[in-house]
């Protein structure tokens, strides 16, 4: 196969992948339970202080009601430590604004740590992330203060590197409550499919479609979400 | 719904396992040697390009992980001409390379060290008596790109210095080498079109 034809085949594959994702997204929007389009936009800036330590700042906005309302907004700061080439640990604090049913924004604070193991096998890369999180509702002096709610989350991501620029991936994440009075075991699954478009070593964009399946609830509300996240390294 | 998810998960898991097996079966080098449990490879080489038939043998020995641990070159009478030995750490990184003459005397030893991310950071070359001949230090930036190479002689004096530059996509733009007094002695520059 000549160089040009190989490039054409690759280009065709990428177009097919994008088209497939668009079709899945379109189809899922039509059958989505929330009957609206939800989108998340995020920006994450990170800086390697040295070969081991890194810091990051991230912000996300989750819009619902066909992108007309701001549902959740958050700002996140974190510090990371690369233990080995394959293993990385992070500590984060996330300040969240959550829109309640009476259209008021509730403050939530999330503290979490992650431990991520990544391995590359040829063009495939596997990433296993454990996240232990502690969530509190409102400020401690507020009457609505509640928490902490503890969760253990485990996520497996499988990514395929088509070339430097394109990397489609799929992921599955299990949520396990650690101190819930009624629920035990996995109480939520989160599946995602998307791709990372790398523009340079310093800038990439991650576009994904995500489905959340809550379990052990009386009214189960499956959530469908399209997310666009930009990553900047400085 | 749960049954459907469970079914899809099983299919996904099966695909992942199949892909991993495919990778193992097409692996080259040490993996291929380890998979076949090869201990040694003996090769006979007959070179008649210059008219006279030159016969030599090589024996390569491998460990259980398929890594080369010993290499011997023998003449037509099966006498050892040179031999080399290799030692690795638990991660499979080459730690030491020793060279021996026909009498089995150590002629050269190269010791390599790595950082915790598996990147080579120094290489020390010793002669047969254990005297340091030269040392190479490799310096990386925060993103683990090789930025500098410093070669010092036995007295610790800088003998050669190499600098690397990369573009925004991580491709090598230039490699410049300088001698002990800082004069440019070698330059290679690449230009990329994307």
Image: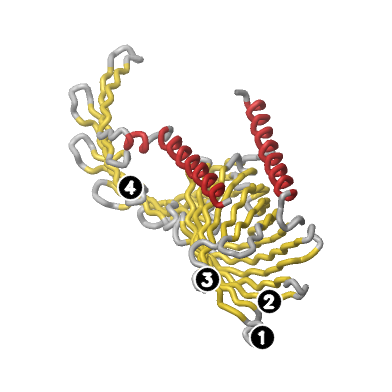
Q: Is residue A102 left or right of residue A162?
A: right
Residue at 28 percent of width and 33 percent of height: B38
Of the pair A108 and B116, the residue shown nearer to us: A108
Measuring from the top left, give residue B23's x and y in whole percent.
Answer: 45, 37
Where residue A5 sits, quadrant-wise, is top right
- Across the whole image, how many numbered discs are drawn on residues? 4
Residue A182 numbered tag: 3
Give the crowd class for mark 1: few <14, some 14-19, many >=20 residues within 10 Å: few
The residue identified by callout 4 is B110
Q: Tell me: residue A88, above or below residue B112.
A: below
Q: Are marks 2 and 4 on the same chain?
A: no
Q: The residue marked by circle 2 belongs to what chain?
A: A
**Residue found at the far top of this picture:** B51
| Residue A78 visible in the snapshot | yes
Q: Pointers 2 and 1 in contact (CB under 8 A)?
A: yes
| Residue B183 visible in the snapshot | no
The image's colouring method is secondary structure
Which of discs 2 and 3 lies nearer the camera? The answer is: 3
Q: Pointers 1 and 4 in contact (CB under 8 A)?
A: no
In which quadrant is the C terminus of chain B drawn?
top right
The residue identified by callout 1 is A142
State the SS at label 1.
loop
Query: CA gap, disc 1 to disc 4?
Result: 66 Å
- Disc nearer the start of the sequence (2/3): 2
Q: Are marks 1 and 3 on the same chain?
A: yes
Residue at 56 percent of width and 68 percent of height: A79
Residue B194 numbered tag: none
Query: CA gap, disc 1 to disc 3?
Result: 25 Å
Q: Are marks 2 and 3 on the same chain?
A: yes
The residue identified by callout 2 is A107
């Amino acid at each position: 196969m000549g160089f040009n034809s190989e490039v054409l085949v690759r280009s065709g594959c990428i177009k097919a992948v994008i088209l497939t994702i668009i079709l899945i997204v379109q189809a899922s929007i039509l059958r989505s339970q929330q009957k609206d389009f939800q989108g998340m936009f995020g920006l994450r800036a990170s800086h390697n202080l040295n070969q081991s330590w890194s810091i990051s700042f991230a912000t996300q906005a989750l819009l619902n009601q066909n992108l007309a309302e701001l549902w959740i907004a958050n700002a996140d700061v974190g510090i990371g430590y690369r233990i080995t080439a394959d293993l990385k640990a992070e500590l984060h604090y996330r300040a969240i604004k959550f829109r309640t049913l009476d259209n008021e924004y509730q403050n939530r604070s999330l503290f979490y740590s992650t431990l991520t193991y990544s391995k590359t096998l040829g063009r495939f890369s596997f990433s296993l992330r454990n996240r232990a999180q502690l969530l509190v509702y409102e400020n401690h002096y507020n009457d609505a203060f509640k928490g902490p709610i503890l969760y253990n989350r485990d996520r497996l991501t499988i990514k395929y590197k088509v070339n430097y620029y394109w990397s489609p991936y799929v992921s599955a994440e299990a949520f396990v409550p650690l101190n819930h009075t009624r629920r035990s075991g996995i109480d939520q699954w989160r599946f995602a499919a998307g791709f990372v478009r790398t523009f340079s070593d310093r800038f990439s964009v991650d576009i994904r479609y995500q489905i959340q399946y809550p379990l052990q609830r009386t009214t189960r509300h499956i959530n469908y979400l399209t997310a666009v996240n930009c990553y900047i390294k400085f | 719904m749960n049954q459907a998810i469970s079914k899809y998960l099983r299919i996904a898991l099966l695909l992942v396992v199949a892909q991993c097996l495919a990778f193992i079966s097409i692996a080259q080098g040490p993996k291929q040697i380890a998979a076949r449990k090869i201990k040694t490879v003996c090769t006979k080489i007959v070179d008649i390009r210059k008219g006279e038939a030159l016969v030599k043998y090589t024996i390569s020995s491998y460990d259980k992980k398929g890594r080369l641990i010993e290499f011997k070159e023998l003449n037509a009478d099966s006498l050892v001409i040179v031999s080399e030995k290799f030692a690795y750490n638990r991660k499979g990184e080459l730690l030491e390379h020793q060279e021996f003459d026909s009498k089995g005397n150590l002629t050269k030893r190269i010791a390599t060290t790595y950082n915790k991310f598996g990147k080579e950071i120094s290489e020390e070359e010793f002669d047969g008596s254990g005297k340091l001949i030269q040392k190479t230090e490799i310096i990386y930036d925060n993103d683990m790109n090789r930025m500098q190479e410093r070669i010092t002689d036995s007295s610790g004096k800088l003998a050669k210095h190499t600098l690397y530059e990369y573009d925004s996509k991580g491709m090598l733009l230039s490699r410049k080498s300088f001698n002990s007094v800082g004069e440019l002695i070698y330059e290679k520059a690449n230009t990329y079109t994307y």
